[in-house]
Image (spheres, rainbow, N blue to C red):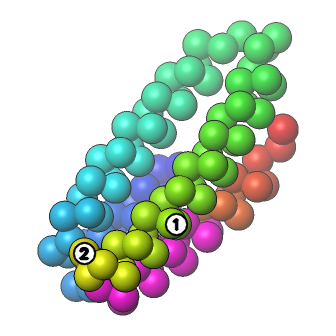
């Protein structure tokens, strides 16, 4: 997870995305969600952990789908450049593969 956050930070600091306000908001929201999920997993006992992981994976998949739509709209509206949008869409695709690979 930390490696993926660092990768996202590198994409957002890239010349294509560095000035986009949307990308800064995306990072802030993503970091907040990851911290919250980690805290919930840390508190879960063995009996409830599997159900929690299933819910978190489902929620992550939904949110990643929404993020993809928001990015597409942002590119179409000129809020972010297409180069930045392409980089972020590729990153979201990688995260989706990671989430799909989580055993649940």
How packed is label 1: few (under 14 Cα within 10 Å), some, or many (20 or more)? Answer: some
Q: Is 2 rendered above or below residue 8?
A: above
Residue 11 in sight: no
Is residue 6 in the magenta section? no
Res. 73 image quadrant? bottom left
Q: Position of residue 83 (x, y in %)?
A: 36, 89
Q: Residue at x 37, y 37 (%)?
A: 32
Location of mark 2 (residue): 79
Label 2: how many Cα within 10 Å (few below 14, some 14–19, many 20+): some
Image side of residue 46 versus residue 2, left or right? right
Q: Is 70 on the left or on the right of 62, as rendered?
A: left
Position of residue 89 measured from the top left corner of the image (x, y, whole percent): 51, 75
Q: Residue furthest bottom?
A: 83
- The residue at 66%/51% (across/down) is 61
In the structure shown, which secondary structural element does the residue marked by tag 1 occupy? helix
Location of mark 1 (residue): 68
In the rendered structure, find residue 92 and report the number of the disc placed on it. Answer: none
Which segment did they paint magenta? 80-94
User: Element type at marker 2?
Assistant: loop
- Residue 35: which quarter of the image? top left
Report which quarter residue 44 is drawn in.
Answer: top right
Which residue is farthest left? 19
- What's the distance in space between the residues labelled 2 and 1, CA to CA? 14 Å
Q: Earlier in the sequence, mark 2 or mark 1?
A: 1
Q: Is residue 35 above or below residue 44?
A: below
On the image, the x and y values in percent for residue 18 come to: 20, 75
Residues 72 and 94: in front is: 72
Q: Nearer the viewer, residue 67 or 88?
A: 67
> Where's the C terminus, which quadrant?
top right
The reply to whether the C-beta atoms of the residues labelled 2 and 1 are less than 8 Å apart is no
Residue found 26% across the figure and 63% down from its top: 22
Q: Is residue 60 visible?
A: yes
């Amino acid at each position: 997870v930390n490696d993926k956050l660092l990768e996202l930070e590198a994409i957002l600091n890239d010349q294509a995305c560095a000035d986009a306000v949307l990308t800064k908001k995306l990072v802030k929201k993503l970091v907040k969600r990851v911290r919250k999920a980690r805290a919930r997993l840390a508190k879960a006992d063995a009996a409830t952990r599997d159900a929690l992981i299933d819910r978190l994976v489902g929620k992550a998949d939904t949110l990643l789908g929404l993020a993809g739509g928001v990015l597409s709209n942002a590119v179409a509206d000129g809020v972010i450049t297409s180069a930045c949008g392409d980089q972020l869409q590729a990153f979201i695709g990688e995260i989706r593969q990671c989430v799909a690979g989580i055993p649940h």
